[in-house]
Image (tube, helix red, strand yellow):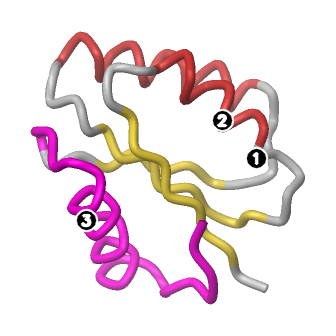
Amino acid sequence: MNVCAIILDYFGAENTERCLISLAHQGIKTIYLVDNSGCPSASAQLHKVLDSVRSKRVDYDVEVISAGKNLGFARGVNYALLHDRRFGSPHDYYL
């Protein structure tokens, strides 16, 4: 089973960190983390949190993607789905 999770972050790095940690060992192969803030300081905080999560040796790959602005929820999810189809191998399931 090839499962991908899509998480949108909008000025919520602490919540995103808890979400990422909770997804460890759940059978997820890839996580697309959509930086939906469009703010350099929020992006820097998000990358700092991501480094912390990766140091815990989670069992999935995380890729941060950003359009450079807030796309809203639905467009943000569609942005990640389009990215997955264009640059990866589309997954069987999305969370």
Q: Earlier in the sequence, mark 1 or mark 3?
A: 1
State the SS at label 2: helix
Q: Amino acid at mark 2?
A: Cys
Q: Residue 50 is drawn in which quadrant? A: top right
Q: Position of residue 84 (x, y in %)?
A: 40, 75
Kindly identify which residue carries mark 3: 79
Position of residue 81 relative to residue 79, above or below, is below
Tag 1: amino acid: Leu
Let me know if residue 82 is in the magenta part. Answer: yes
Label 3: which secondary element: helix
The boundaries of the magenta stretch are 68-95
Along the horizontal axis of the image, is 63 left or right of 53? left
Determine whether 1 is above or below 65 in the image: below
Is residue 61 located in the magenta-colored stretch of the structure? no
Q: Going by the image, does 64 lie left or right of 30?
A: left
What residue appears at the point 20 percent right and 48 percent down from the top-left corner?
A: 72
Q: Residues within 10 Å of mark 1 (few under 14, many from 20)?
A: some
